[in-house]
Amino acid sequence: MAKISVIGAGMTGSTTAHWLAEREIADVVLVDIVDGMPQGKALDLTEAMPIIGSDAKITGTSDYADTADSDIVVITAGLPRKPGMSREDLLVKNATIVGSVAEETIKYSPNATYIVLTNPLDTMTYMTMKKTGLPANKVIGQAGVLDSARMSAFIAMETGVSTQNINCYVLGGHGDSMVPLTRHSNIAGVPLEKYLDADKLAAIVQRTRKGGGEIVGLLKTGSAFYAPSLAIVQMAEAILSDRNLILPCAAYLNGEYGQEGIFFGAPVMLGKNGIEKIIEYELNDEEKAALQKSADAVHKSVEELKKLVEL
Ligand code: APR
């Protein structure tokens, strides 16, 4: 079986391990700095496997040597948001954590593909690429699958149509200026406007942009973890199965969508080499302007990072 190391065994990390093991996608190594916690969660999950008949092996550890030869490394280590915080407010603390995690893991798994979840997402993914020295196709940020799933969920709630018929695409940075592409989204091939009037659609776009904050506000002690972790699992499975599955993910752009030198949400094809291809949509002026606004926010965050860390 393939091997996936999940760094950070908190809410998102342990839930990622749960979905991966239940679906027998890979053996999982859960890593955390809290003594005993990753070991305890891994043992608990191991004891759940006979009930569902999964032979996935789950190991908990604080020793990076146990992550050796991972096919995929998932980084969830870091602080989650508290009510009132933006993802950017996490930059200083999480930069230190993600930097050290990237340096430790790459020593043991130089051929792994990395999937980053820690916020601020686009900047932490950039940092991971710089600290590991990996080529851009091997480092991917998870944001668009989650944001698009949130939009689909809100549309399903409003229309009553099965989530399986709803196709949504949210691109751009993983912040409040993310860009839900309503014109490219559809319900079984039919434009969203046929199902929803303009006000309802605008409200869904806004709710999608603030989707993470809505959950932080309800939970009060942490941020979302079920949907973010399942998004990681979909990406990891696509890579391990060499599926060439097109998903919106944070990818390092080199001119695509008019952007250069940042990780930014775009549709990418995921296969055995990580990002096999970046897909470009034809955008109108309004969509281009919205993406530029979002890119400006990501550039600003990367500049902040560069003031904190030598990259
Ligand atoms: N090495 C390994 N693990 C670490 C380190 C480190 N240097 N520093 C912190 N951790 C661990 C914490 O001990 C904790 O168990 O990371 C875990 C984070 O888990 P939670 O606090 O439950 O946070 P979670 O909800 O999983 O979110 C993690 O993902 O979605 C983003 O915004 C979210 O940045 C946050 C990250």
Image (cartoon, rainbow, N blue to C red):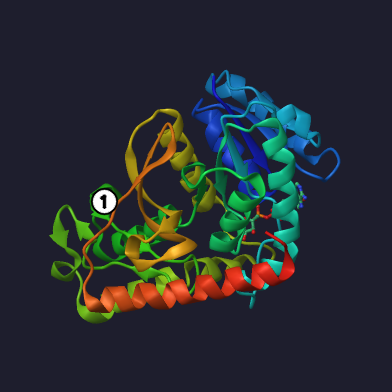
Q: Position of residue 202 (x, y in %)?
A: 30, 78
**Residue receiving disc 1:** 162
Count of labels in the image: 1
- Badge 1, how many Cα within 10 Å: few under 14, some, many 20+? some
Give the left or right position of residue 242, taking residue 14 as reference: left
- Quadrant of the rendered structure where residue 215 is? bottom right
Give the left or right position of residue 300, taking residue 234 as reference: right
Q: Position of residue 150 (x, y in %)?
A: 41, 60
Q: Position of residue 267 (x, y in %)?
A: 34, 53
**Residue visible at 61% across and 45% down?**
133
State the residue in front, 33 or 165.
Answer: 33
- Quadrant of the rendered structure where residue 192 is? bottom left
Q: Which amino acid type is shown beneath numbered disc 1?
A: Ser
State the residue in front, 102 or 165.
Answer: 102
Q: Position of residue 209 (x, y in %)?
A: 43, 71
Q: Residue furthest right?
A: 35
Residue 82 seen in render: no
**Residue visible at 53% across and 30% down?**
22
Quadrant (top left, top right, bottom left, bottom right) of the N terminus:
top right
State the residue in front, 85 or 252.
Answer: 252
Q: Does dot 1 land on a helix, a strand or a loop? A: loop
The vertical placement of 117 against 172, above or below, is above
